Image: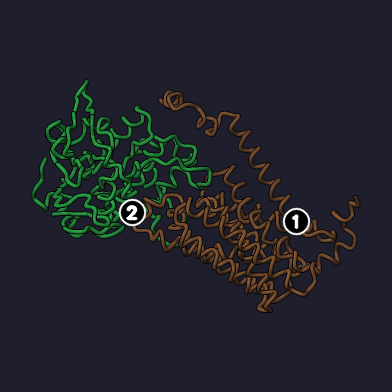
């Protein structure tokens, strides 16, 4: 699924470049995401994975190039872009239940106090059902497990009927069972609803089966292609500029020997930093 | 020890009439504290409240010394502190160190101003420990006006402020002006602290701006019930404290803080007892695989 026709793509980055204080994270990035397509964004900490998402969200300006969303320049706060960040266990100071978090996705940007509405209630119920969170809809967010919280966040992101879902390490700090169920949910919804997904992750394995393409950022450059094309020793060695081994074992991909020099902390935007 | 200095209900009716202003002030302040407290908790800013209150104390003391007025001084001090914390302390770690730097400075400045002030000592300590008896008509009016600004300000921005407070990243992605709302909230918080300092004193502001909301959050996570309970708790603490303190010869603050604390303890016990049943809270403490198995 390499959509080059801009009309058929939800997102197109053209000749995109991003630099911080003279350090180039990536440049000449061309990326098209088709409806229903899932693109994994991989790379070391500090390689600009999360920054790419922030640029698409309009929170960071590209140093060069342009980003179009649905054929138009992206604007900040477009509700048709859903955003699911990494799971942060909400603490006791969160006066919200799961359904209230979802409701914020519907009307959280509007001023005033939320007034009761039967229509809104039904919408929230439907969103909770679509992510399998009905059972804990009335439970306080702070008492949800990590996996449950991520399901609720996905429900919140669905509220804007997104055409593009940006996931920033949504599986981080989840146990393997939850990683699987949350990523399966994202994959199923992307196909059912036909939204594109950019899935930033440091570990491709939980989502390897459902990923259409991989964008690998490293060493100020990048590679795009199917997982089989990009995740090879030759491609990654070339990208990192030093020998890197990609080992495939029991359907898992293990990348060995990536230089630690990339963990230079030049920017804190990397989700896992 | 003479108990009548702590609880004394002689001539209660007459005192009640005399202190009508104080009781109204307590109720209004309870409303402000209960509502602001919910956001203080969800933004994790309890320490900031304390820092702001010390600078508000410094402002009030300076206002007293230079004859500008205690109200004006406390508002100026609180707003300056709130803005400094809001602008410099976007991240929690930065924020805590900034507050820790500001707080002793404010307290010291306040003590300096009070030492230089030639007036009576009793009034001076009121700024630290509360002076509910001193609410005259002009003061009550200014308190109500400022409180109205705070409450209306919160109601207008309630939803986006909630979004930005509990989930800043997603709120920003949704186009909520997270940074602007943060400064906006700090201004409202500054005003809320300033009015509270004038009544309960700067050392005890936390008991109305934090404790009631913290108590409410122990027993509920409903976005409607939490602010309502928090307000009820704050009003109960303040008005209850004033009514108990009326005839006694000690400041009102110990009464307010004790009631507020007891409410918190009761809420914790309720939460604990619920958790001991079959409720969700116990559920949350089980290891994840067990919960998974229970749900499937």
In the image, residue A119 lies at what x, y percent? 39, 51
Q: CA distance from mark 2 to mark 1?
A: 45 Å
How packed mark 1 is, by other alpha carbons closer than 10 Å (few <14, some 14-19, many 20 or more), is: many
Choose between A27 and A118: the one closer to the eye.
Answer: A27
How far from the left and from the top, in percent, is residue B27?
68, 62
Question: In front here: A6 or A264?
Answer: A264
Image position of A179 (left or right of A253): right
**Colouring scheme applied when the structure was drawn:** by chain
Residue B88 in sight here: yes
- Residue at the far left: name it: A5
Please state the horizontal and vertical placement of residue A81, each as a whole percent of the image: 27, 51
Callout 1: chain? B
Q: Please give left or right for residue A106 compared with residue B87 in the image.
A: left
Q: Chain of mark 2?
A: B
The green-tinted chain is A
Quadrant placement of the C terminus of chain B = top left
SS for dot 2: helix
Which residue is drawn at the image coordinates 44% and 27% (left, top)? B288
- Residue named by callout 1: B241
Along the polypeptide, which appears first: circle 2 or circle 1? 2
Query: Residue at position x 17%, y 54% from top?
Result: A16
Q: Foreground residue, A144 or B169?
A: B169
Residue B116 figure quarter: bottom right
Q: Secondary structure at mark 1?
A: helix
Classify residue B4 as left or right of residue B196. Answer: right
Number of marks drawn: 2
Q: Colour of chain B?
A: brown
| The disc label shown at residue A8, or none | none
Q: Which residue is mark 2?
A: B173
Q: Residues within 10 Å of mark 2 (few under 14, many from 20)?
A: many
């Amino acid at each position: 699924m390499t959509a080059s026709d801009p009309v058929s793509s939800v997102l197109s980055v053209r000749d995109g470049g991003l630099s911080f204080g003279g350090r180039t994270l990536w440049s000449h990035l061309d990326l098209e995401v088709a409806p229903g397509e899932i693109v994994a964004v991989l790379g070391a900490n500090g390689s600009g994975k999360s920054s790419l998402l922030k640029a698409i969200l309009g929170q960071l300006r590209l140093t060069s190039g342009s980003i179009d969303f649905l054929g138009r320049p992206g604007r900040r706060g477009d509700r048709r872009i859903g955003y699911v960040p990494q799971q942060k266990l909400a603490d006791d100071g969160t006066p919200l239940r799961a359904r209230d978090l979802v409701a914020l996705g519907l009307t959280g940007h509007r001023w005033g106090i939320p007034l009761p509405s039967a229509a809104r209630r039904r919408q929230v119920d439907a969103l909770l059902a679509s992510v399998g969170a009905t059972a804990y809809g009335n439970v306080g967010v702070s008492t949800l497990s990590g996996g449950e919280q991520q399901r609720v966040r996905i429900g919140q992101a669905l509220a804007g009927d997104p055409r593009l879902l940006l996931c920033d390490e949504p599986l981080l700090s989840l146990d393997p069972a939850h990683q699987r169920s949350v990523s399966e949910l994202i994959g199923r919804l992307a196909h059912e609803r036909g939204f594109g997904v950019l899935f930033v992750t440091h570990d491709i394995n939980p989502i390897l089966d459902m990923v259409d393409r991989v964008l690998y950022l490293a060493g100020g450059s990048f590679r795009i292609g199917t997982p089989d094309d990009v995740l090879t020793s030759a491609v990654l060695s070339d990208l990192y500029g030093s020998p890197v081994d990609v080992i495939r074992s029991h359907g898992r991909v293990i990348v060995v020997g990536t230089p630690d020099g990339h963990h230079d902390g030049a920017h804190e935007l990397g989700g896992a930093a | 020890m003479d108990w009548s200095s702590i609880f004394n209900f002689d001539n209660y009716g007459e005192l009640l009439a005399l202190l009508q202003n104080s009781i109204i002030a307590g109720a209004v302040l309870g409303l402000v504290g209960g509502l602001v407290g919910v956001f203080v908790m969800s933004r994790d800013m309890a320490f900031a409240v304390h820092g702001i209150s010390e600078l508000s104390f410094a402002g009030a003391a300076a206002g007293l010394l230079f004859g500008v007025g205690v109200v004006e001084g406390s508002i100026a001090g609180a707003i300056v502190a709130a803005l400094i914390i809001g602008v410099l302390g976007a991240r929690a770690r930065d924020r805590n160190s900034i507050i820790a730097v500001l707080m002793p400075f404010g307290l010291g400045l306040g003590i300096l101003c009070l030492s230089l002030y030639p007036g009576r000592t009793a009034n001076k300590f009121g700024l630290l420990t509360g002076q509910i008896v001193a609410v005259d008509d002009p003061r009550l009016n200014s308190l109500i006006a400022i409180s109205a600004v705070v409450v209306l300000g919160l109601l207008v921005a309630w939803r986006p402020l909630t979004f930005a407070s509990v989930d800043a990243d997603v709120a920003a992605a949704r186009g909520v002006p997270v940074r602007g709302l943060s400064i906006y909230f700090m201004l409202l918080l500054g005003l809320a602290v300033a009015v509270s300092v004038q009544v309960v004193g700067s050392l005890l502001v936390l008991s109305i701006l934090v404790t009631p909301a913290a108590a409410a959050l122990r027993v509920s996570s409903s976005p409607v019930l939490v602010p309502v309970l928090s307000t009820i708790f704050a009003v109960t603490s303040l008005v209850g404290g004033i009514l108990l303190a009326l005839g006694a010869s000690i400041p009102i603050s110990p009464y307010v803080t004790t009631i507020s604390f007891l409410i918190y303890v009761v809420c914790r016990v309720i939460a604990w007892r619920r958790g001991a049943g079959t409720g969700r809270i116990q559920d949350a403490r089980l290891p994840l695989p067990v919960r998974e198995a229970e749900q499937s």
